[in-house]
Amino acid sequence: MAYSQVEKVRVCVREEADRRSEAEAVVCYMKIGLFTWVFNDRPFEDVLRFASGLGYEAVELAVDKGRDNHLNMDKILSGGATEFKKKVEKYGLEISALSSHIDSQLVGGPHGVDTDTIIRGSPEEKMRYGVERMKKTVETAAALDVGVVNGFVGCENFSRWFVWPGGVELWEEGYKRIVERWNPILDVFGDHSIRFAHEPFPQEQAFSIETAEALLKAFDMRKEFGFNLDPANLLWCLVDPVVFVKRLGDRIFSVHAKDGELVKENLGYSGSAATGDWRRFDRGFRFRVVGWGQIEWRRLLTALVMVKYDHVLSVEHEDPWLNRTDGCRKAINFLKPLIPEPAEEEWTRDRLDER
């Protein structure tokens, strides 16, 4: 096709813009981290040494009571933050996020016998406990210079996701209650320039793309609220994590590297919503080590690069088939070759000039 001089200029400008967009995308660099709660029974420094030895670059640390053997918030807030950070840095690691998945659940609920395993008390006492623990978590994150806290917003009654018998209105009211309970907490997050990343998951007010978008809208798009992307959770709900990234990429503050498997031979028996122990082998759905399930990791990582996600992929081991040590080793060995390397500025410029 013959182009006029003006058309040639337009084509060149358009191609140059495309190339620069491509070059900017590959600059994004993701690190691989380890969510250490799976080794909660092991001494903290042993876990740091193990993670560093495998090539992990970061750790995500749980602060919920019962999962806080590696990070005690009272010790941090009584002057221990500097020493704690030095201990982590000694092994060439950084803290990618704090996890308060258990305590945070009590803010939104449920507040009946379902959460007695967390704390016993009246609904008001449970909610107050959740709020206090979250505010304390923000203070701890600030003391440690950690910019993200992962957790759950909760859900008063997850059975209301279906319209019967209560009707659509009851589920829609759930968004309002979550916002009313969480906004004062998010104000504290904002005061410390820290972000809260809700993890979409069954039993949560936001468990899919449409519910995540609805909750974000209910929060009036406030900047402190976003998501911790766990692709296995989304697969469980038959939601494509790549579509989640493309629609909500600028609100992904953290990512869990965890795989999942819809087990064909078991689905016909238990469905994807199997009851009983989540680790039983005959479930229709089970969590897997990265690379051992059905998540398309190359496709997912490409989507994350395109939205310029440059934080940590935090490996969370919940595979019932593989032991935790082997699983964490297999996960990083699978992910490492897939992580795009950051392009050097001069090399990127030279490559563009050559083209």
Image (cartoon, helix red, strand yellow):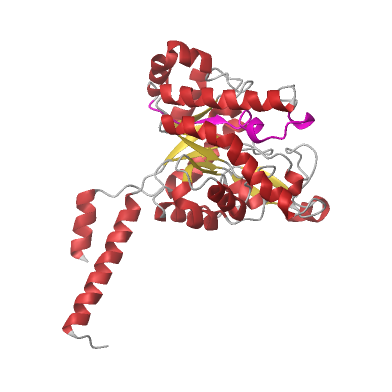
Reply above or below: 177 against 45: below
Q: Can residue 152 be seen in this view?
A: no
Residue 146 in the figure: left or right of residue 64: left
Residue found at x 44% / y 34%: 190
Residue 341 visible? The answer is yes
- Return the x and y of residue 176 as percentages of the image width and height: 62, 44
Q: Is residue 169 above or below residue 36?
A: below
Q: Residue at x 23, y 70 (%)?
A: 13
Residue 189 locus on image (x, y percent): 47, 32
* Residue lying furthest left: 5
Can residue 15 be found in the magenta stretch?
no
Percent coordinates x, y for residue 110 in the rendering: 72, 35
Q: Which quarter of the picture shows residue 163?
A: bottom right
Q: Residue furthest bottom?
A: 2
Foreground: 68 or 188? 188
Magenta stretch, residue numbers: 92-115
Location of residue 205 with respect to 317 vertically, above or below: below
Q: Quadrant of the N terminus?
A: bottom left
Q: Does residue 189 appear to the left or right of 24 in the view shown?
A: right
For the C terminus, the quadrant is: bottom left
Q: In which quarter of the image is residue 123?
A: top right
